[in-house]
Each structure stands twice: as C-alpha cells, then as structure tokens.
Image: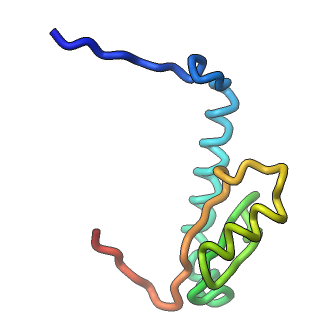
Amino acid sequence: MRNTAFTTLEDLGLDRSEVLEKIQEKQSNQKWLQEHMDELRERYPDKYVAVSGKKVALSAKHLPELIQKLNKKFKEKDLTTFAVDLVTKEKVIWVL
C-alpha cells in the first residue's frame, strides 16, 4: 500500500480565493493576448509582450529585458498574473 501525502493551499499559507482570483486574471490576460495576436503582430513584431488588464503593459526585444522592465515598473503587482509571449512577425507553429 502506497502512502501519498497531500498539501493544501492553506498548508502553504495561501488563501484559496486569492489564488483562484490570480489564476482567473492570468487566464483573462492570456485569452486577450491570443485574441489580439494579429493586431499585436503589426504593432510588436518579433518582440516579447506582457499583457495585464487586457492591454499591453510593456514590450521588449529580449525576454530578460522585459522581465527587468516589469520588475522595475510594477514593483507592487504580482507578475504571475501577466500573460507574456513572443509575438512573431509571421505566424509560427511550435512543435515540441
């Protein structure tokens, strides 16, 4: 018989409703990013963009640069709620 240990959000000191709210915010930003990808390709070709509040918060040519900018500009915001993606000039299908 196998003994399995489970850890709850509460065990980790996290509030369930806050975690769910952050997940929903992240999903909303990700959905907006995908729905506006064609428009973003025109405005931000071959750049990384960070979306928050259903708008582009920042963009940069390189991911480390974008993260640095985000940390500087949004010190008080939980960056895990941002949707971040590389907006390629042409449509790309990633095969992993």
Measuring from the top left, give residue 72's x and y in whole percent: 82, 64
Q: Quadrant of residue 44?
A: bottom right
Measuring from the top left, give residue 37's x and y in whole percent: 57, 76
Q: Residue at x 60, y 42 (%)?
A: 23
Pick whichever, 15 or 89, lies toward us: 15
Pick whichever, 14 or 27, lies toward us: 14
Q: Quadrant of residue 70?
A: bottom right
State the count of labels: 0
Quadrant in which the C terminus is drawn: bottom left
Question: In the picture shown, does residue 71 fall above or below 47?
Answer: above
Q: Residue at x 68, y 76 (%)?
A: 65
Is residue 13 toward the left or the right of residue 58 in the image?
A: left
Question: In the picture shown, does residue 80 fall above or below 68?
Answer: above
Is residue 73 toward the left or the right of residue 21 in the image?
A: right
Question: In the picture shown, does residue 88 fall above or below 3?
Answer: below
Question: In the picture shown, does residue 91 fall above or below 49?
Answer: below
Measuring from the top left, give residue 36's x and y in whole percent: 61, 73
Q: Residue at x 67, y 27 (%)?
A: 17
**In the image, farthest residue toward the top:** 1
Quadrant in which the N terminus is drawn: top left
Is residue 59 toward the left or the right of residue 84 in the image?
A: right
Q: Residue at x 26, y 12 (%)?
A: 3
Q: Quadrant of residue 15?
A: top right
